[in-house]
Image: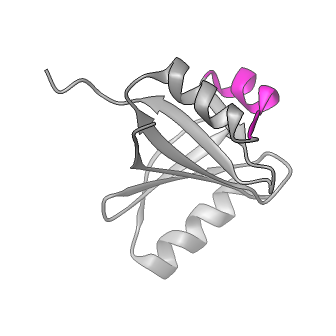
Amino acid sequence: MVAKFNRFIAIGVSDKERAAEDFCALFSASVTDRRDDWVEVTAGPFLFYFVEEGNRDIAFSVDVADHDSALAEILARGFTLDRETTERVGETFVLSPDGMRINLTVAPSTE
């Protein structure tokens, strides 16, 4: 599987507005978008999404060329599909046996 980290990182927090405000103040970042369920903060080349999901999980996002084969390979390595997050967000999320969450996205076409 060929995967590359992209610039998106989601962080589960208890108060998304407060977390975004603190992050901006500490790291010279800025709020660049917000929705009912997340606040987007830009810091350098990275986009952090602060989400209130009742936990403190971090989800790293990776780009894959072939979603189905990447998902099959990652599941074969013992990861499980995070159905609740996948259904809520509308993108594929997997969990490692140790609880690490990864968001699989299809790499943008370079054509």
Instruction: Identify the residue at image location x=47%, y=43%.
Output: 62
Which colour assignment does the render follow? one colour
Decide which of 102, 38 is in the foreground and name it: 102
Instruction: Give the image quarter of residue 103.
Output: top right
The location of residue 66, given as percent across then percent down, is 43, 22
The location of residue 72, given as percent across then percent down, is 62, 25
- State yes or no: residue 107 in magenta: no
**Total count of labels:** 0
Instruction: Identify the residue at image location x=73%, y=21%.
Output: 87
Per the rendered image, the range of residues in magenta is 79-90
Name the side, left or right, on which 97 lies relative to 22. right
- State yes or no: residue 88 in magenta: yes
From the viewer's perspective, is residue 96 above or below residue 37? below
Name the side, left or right, on which 77 lies relative to 40. right
From the viewer's perspective, is residue 76 above or below residue 29? above
Instruction: Identify the residue at image location x=81%, y=50%.
Output: 97
From the viewer's perspective, is residue 79 above or below residue 28? above
The location of residue 23, given as percent across then percent down, is 54, 71
Decide which of 7, 70 is in the foreground and name it: 70
Decide which of 7, 54 is in the foreground and name it: 7
Name the side, left or right, on which 103 lies relative to 100. left
Instruction: Give the image quarter of residue 11.
Output: bottom right
From the viewer's perspective, is residue 57 above or below residue 86? below
The location of residue 33, given as percent across then percent down, is 46, 43
